[in-house]
Each structure stands twice: as C-alpha cells, then as structure tokens.
Image (cartoon, coloured by chain):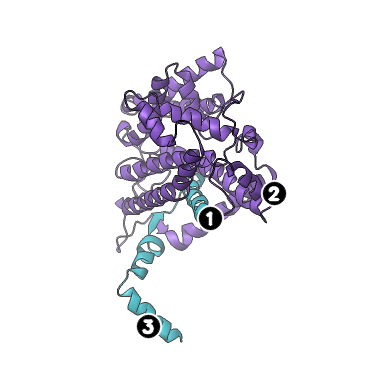
Amino acid sequence: MPYSNTEEEAFASIEYIMRDVDYGWVIRYMHTTGASMFFAVVYLHMFRGLLYGSYQKPKELVWIFGCAIYLAMMAEGFLGYVLPYGQMSYWGAQVIISLFGAIPYIGESLELWIRGDYYISGITVSRFFALHVVALPLVLIALVFLHLVALHEVGAGNPEGVDIEEHLDEDGVPLDSVPFFPYKVLNALVGIGVFMTVFAVIMFFFPEGGGYFIEMANFEEANPLVTPEHIAPVWYYSPYYAMLRAVPDKLGGLIVMGSAVAILFVVPWLDKSKVASIRYKGIYSKFALALFGISFLTLGYLGTVSVTELRKTMSVICTIIYFAFFLLMPFYTKYEKTLKVPERL
Amino acid sequence: MSEMVGKLFGWVNSRLPLSNTFERHLSKHPVPSKVNFWYLFGALASVVLLFKLFLEYG
C-alpha cells in the first residue's frame, strides 16, 4: 500500500500514487468519483422513498436501516476526506471535530478523544485511516445486509403504492410480480450500463468535478498556520453545512445539523396518509415535497459559497422549510383529500 | 466428473441452504412487475459499494 498514514508522508504519498504508481491515478479517481456518485445515487434513492412512501408500514425497518447507512456513509466520507492531509482535509476536520467541543461538560474531552492529540496531527490521520478502511466499511456491510434482508422479508414497493400481496396465484405468488432473477437483474443491467458510462466520463475527463468532487484547496498540503480563505465541504455535505452556518450559536448549529439527520429516522411515524404514493396523495403533500426538494437543493448551493447577509437569510428560511416539511407532515398528510388507489398494479 | 460435482453439490446443499437461498432471494423472489426508473438507484448504490469493496482495495 503506497499510502502512508503519517503526518509527514500522507500528502506526498497521495501525489506519489497519482504520478508514479502505475495506474494509481485511475484507482484514486475511481475512489473520489465513486464517493460522489455513491452519494448522488443514495440521495436519489432516498428521494424515491419520499415520493412513493417506501417507509410506510411494514417497511419501517428497511427505511431505518437505510437512514443508518446514510449516517455511516457521512462518517465514512468525512474520515476519508481527512486522509490526503491537504488544506481542506485539515480545516474541514478542524470545523467538524470542534463541533463536538460545543457539547456541554464533555465537549472538550470528547474533542481530545476523537483527535487523540491536542490538535489535528498524524495521530488523528492514523486513527481515521483505521476507521475508514476497516471499522466503518464493516459497519456499512452489516447495515446493507440488514437493509436487504428486511426488504426481502416485507417485499419491495411500487410507484402506485398497490399492495401486491392482496392478489396471489394458486402458489401464493403475487399476480403482479416477476422473479427478481433474471427479470429485474437484466433490467437493472441496462441502467448500470448507462451509470457506468457517466461514471467513466467523470472519472476520466472531470475527476475534480469543478472543485465540487475534489476541492481545489486540497491540492495544497495541510498547513495549521494558514486558514483557507473559504472553507466549504464537498457537495454532498453542503446542505447541512448551510444549516450549521444559519445558526449563530455553535451548539445550536450542532443540534440543528444533528436533528436534520435524526428526523429522517422517524418519517415512518410522521406520515399519517392512507396512501403511499405521491400519485394518490393530495395537493398539500405534493406542494410540501416540491418545496422541500427546492429548499434542500438551495441549501446545498448555499453551503458551497461564502456567507453574505442575503445568503444567511435564505439559509434560515430553507432550514425552516426543511424542518417544517417533517414536523407538519402528520397534519398535511392526515387532513388532505387523497385519491383512490387501484386494486391491481 | 460432472456427476461427482453434482454429488458434491448435493452433499453441501443438504447441509447448507445454497439452492434455498438462491430461490428465496433471487430466482423465486417476487418483485413488483411494474416500477419506474426511480427504482434503479438502489441497485446502483449496491454497485458502487461493491466497486469500493472489491476494486479499490489495492
């Protein structure tokens, strides 16, 4: 393994992989592009869940395991981003780790415990490496396994929100179903082909993604004495970063950020609708979901740019909409007029 | 030769749920017959994860 998880060599070892190791650049760009694409497909996968009520009874656990996967991915991505020990690795870690310091009483000790040192150093890099390549991948594999086992137990949903278990043939197999293999596997291969093409184009031609996939400041080695002019996370964390900056108090920001992820876990109990799919839900749900989507994307943009008064106000408004979408869900899903779901798919 | 392989498979299969698992989770696992493109991204997420686990561990 040419990568070195030490303070002195981490940054140089990445450059060594990029320049001198045969096809090292392919492996690295595959990894960085893969990180962004992983988040991209997971965000679309999660939005599908909100669109078609994929969290509704009896799929609550499938959804909860999914949220846990998302949380583990965020941790995994953060740990990995620190490893090249560039400027953004260092200062990104500085921002995130110091957040834990805002927790009353235990904050400071917690910060020290995470870093393993009084400031971010080789010790931090070394433990983050262990967590990134062994501990969290194992957690992710276990959670994905549970996500799939739970899904196969209760059965996959569909865009109509029809319960296919209602109409079975003489063998007890749903009439509106096909076997996963080979039908869905071959079907998915077409999509996988398109996806791999997009993946390859990004990997070979736009690996930095205009500074959104690999940030420009990370091509400079970490320097504790020079703060970059503009600290921003990679695109897949930026909505939460915008929320963090929208709150003036550090602890308040941490609470808002944490709650934004935590609230996802309870969505199955916030949706009181009689129907699952957005196709048969009422106008309030459609309006709420559209507004939520726009706010989340806006927060994503705001988290990547520097703060101005106007942008700060926009962040506050979008954060309020983000939480309102979830907190008002029990009301607008209950009191809206829904359409009748068809019997068969 | 193939008879021996078949016998060996039979021996293992009656002690380990090989064909049972294949049928339960793949060849006989029922999935809705009509879904749209939004249902593709779960498969893509597993593809990326497999990439990361098998291709990038140099």
Whether residue A186 sits left or right of residue B5 in the image: it is right
Q: Secondary structure at mark 3?
A: helix
Image coordinates for residue A100, horizontal then vertical, percent: 40, 28
The chain painted cyan is: B
In the picture of the structure, the residue carrying the numbered disc 2 is: A19
Report the Cα–Cα distance between label 1 and label 2.
19 Å
Q: Colour of chain A?
A: purple
**Label 2 crowd bin: few (<14), some (14–19), many (20+), radius 10 Å:** few
**Residue A196 higher or lower than A68, as above or below:** below
> Which of the two residues, A93 or A259, is positioned nearer the viewer here?
A93
In the picture of the structure, the residue carrying the numbered disc 3 is: B7
- Chain containing the residue with disc 1: B
In the picture of the structure, the residue carrying the numbered disc 1 is: B57
Disc nearest the viewer among 2 and 3: 2
| Residue found 34% across the figure and 41% down from its top | A64
Residue type, mark 1 in image: Tyr
Report the Cα–Cα distance between label 3 and label 1.
36 Å
Asked if one can make out residue B34 in the rendered structure from this viewpoint, the answer is yes
Residue type, mark 3 in image: Lys
| Residue found 62% across the figure and 46% down from its top | A14
Q: Quadrant of the N terminus of chain A?
A: bottom right
